[in-house]
Image (spheres, rainbow, N blue to C red):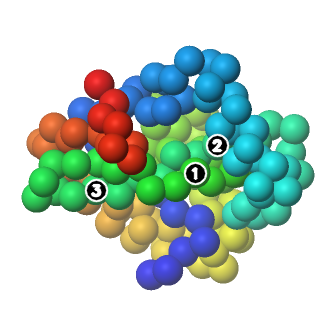
């Protein structure tokens, strides 16, 4: 199912290993502000012109080689970013906010609540399999410790 907005869980073994957390703040700010500018200072998913934009790191996984590679940066609003990180949100957000995320996902993708549940189960299943793998995190030729 091709989706405009998807849940993109990160395996627990690599939580916190990201450009945002590992680069000096000044360097990260330069990267994220360039991402916002390239997207026209609006969410590249829903088009929201929000004061609270996020630079979402997009990752690809090679389970055989145990590599998690940065493949892109995406400018998104807070709600689209929280949909990407729905698993984390289930731990820290209210049920009302989670319901808002589900409705937003359905609206952006033109799908039903049942479609959301199927998508959630599928990606959480994949992430459960990844939970037992310790990934090397790569950004270009750089390995993030």
Q: Residue at x 58, y 51 (%)?
A: 73
What numbered label is drawn on residue 73? 1
Kindly indicate the quadrant of the structure image that contains residue 20: top right
Q: Quadrant of the N terminus?
A: bottom left
In the image, residue 114 above or below residue 43: below
| Label 3 vs 1, first from the N-terminus | 3
Residue at mark 3 = 61
Distance (Cα) linking label 3 and label 1: 15 Å
Q: Is residue 99 visible in the rendered structure shown here?
A: no
What numbered label is drawn on residue 38? none
The image shows residue 123 at horizontal and vertical percentages of 35, 61
Element at badge 1?
A: strand
The crowding category of the residue bearing disc 3, from other C-alpha atoms within 10 Å (few below 14, some 14 to 19, many at least 20), is some
Distance (Cα) linking label 3 and label 2: 19 Å
Q: Nearer the viewer, residue 35 or 95?
A: 35
Element at badge 3?
A: strand
What numbered label is drawn on residue 55? 2
Disc 1 vs disc 2: Cβ atoms closer than 8 Å? Answer: yes
The crowding category of the residue bearing disc 1, from other C-alpha atoms within 10 Å (few below 14, some 14 to 19, many at least 20), is some
Q: Residue at x 35, y 37 (%)?
A: 142
In the image, residue 142 above or below residue 5: above
Q: Residue at x 39, y 43 (%)?
A: 139
The image shows residue 9 at horizontal and vertical percentages of 39, 49
In the image, residue 49 above or below residue 12: below
The image shows residue 90 at horizontal and vertical percentages of 48, 39
Classify residue 43 as left or right of residue 113.
right
């Amino acid at each position: 199912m091709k989706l405009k907005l998807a849940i993109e869980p990160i395996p627990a073994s690599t939580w916190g290993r990201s450009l945002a957390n590992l680069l000096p703040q000044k360097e990260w700010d330069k990267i994220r502000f360039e991402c916002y500018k390239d997207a026209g200072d609006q969410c590249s998913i829903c088009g929201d012109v929000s004061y609270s934009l996020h630079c979402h790191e997009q990752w690809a996984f090679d389970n055989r080689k145990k590599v998690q590679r940065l493949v892109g940066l995406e400018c998104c609003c807070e709600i689209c970013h929280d949909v990407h990180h729905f698993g984390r949100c289930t731990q820290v957000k209210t049920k009302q906010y989670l319901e808002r995320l589900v409705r937003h996902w359905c609206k952006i993708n033109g799908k039903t609540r049942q479609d959301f549940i199927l998508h959630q189960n599928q990606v959480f299943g994949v992430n459960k399999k990844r939970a037992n793998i310790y990934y090397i995190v790569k950004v270009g030729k750089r390995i993030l410790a």
